[in-house]
Amino acid sequence: MFDLRELFRIGETCEINKVVEMDDTVGNKSVHLNQLLSTSSCVETFITACNTITDKHLPEGFITIGHSVEITHVAPTLLGSSITYKATLREISANKLIFHLEAWDGAGEILYGNFERAVVNHMALMDKAVERANKLKEFK
């Protein structure tokens, strides 16, 4: 493989500004919280932010995939609120890129965390997925 330190710069960031819409709320999972921003929606936005940083640097045929995510959601945010999401590349270790995550609205911090993404060959990943699916068929 290649050295990720030659492709990426520690400290590189991506910010995404977004207004909380109905699809971003917990309401699609819990009617009691249907006006509040969901953590899962935040993760989706952070995937976009991290991919914005990584995709432009990766050689043809390579992608990043989520390896682990840790988020602490510290404040509720209502439907219609404007939010800024920020992902910052904090560390490179072997084929892993570790990002610091943070999000805030006009009243302050909403959440923070870390997101570890692995750089993999897309075709090799798909081959493993097909191999696994074939094993499942054997057990039926």
Image: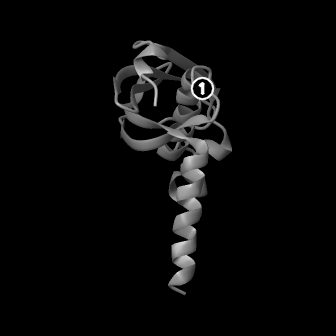
Identity of the residue drawn at 60% across and 53% down = 126
Q: Position of residue 10 (x, y in %)?
A: 40, 14
Q: Residue under circle 1?
A: 59
Q: Please indicate whether residue 47 sits to the left or right of residue 94 in the image.
A: right
Colouring rule applied to residues: one colour
Residues 54 and 104: in front is 54
Residue 112's x, y, as percent?
37, 30
Residue 23 is situated, as x and y percent measured from the top left of the image, at: 66, 46
Give left or right: position of 21 versus 94: right
Residue 28: x, y in percent? 60, 56
Quarter of the C terminus within the rendering? bottom right
Q: Secondary structure at mark 1?
A: loop
Name the foreground residue: 116 vs 138: 138
Within the image, what quadrant is residue 57 found in? top right
The answer to whether one can see residue 34 in this image is: no
Q: Nearer the viewer, residue 106 or 39?
A: 39
Name the kind of residue labelled 1 in the image: Pro
Residue reaching furthest to the bottom: 140
For the point 66% across and 38% down, the residue is 21
Give above or below for 48 relative to 37.
above
Q: Residue at x 39, y 41 (%)?
A: 69
Name the residue nearer the viewer: 33 or 85. 85
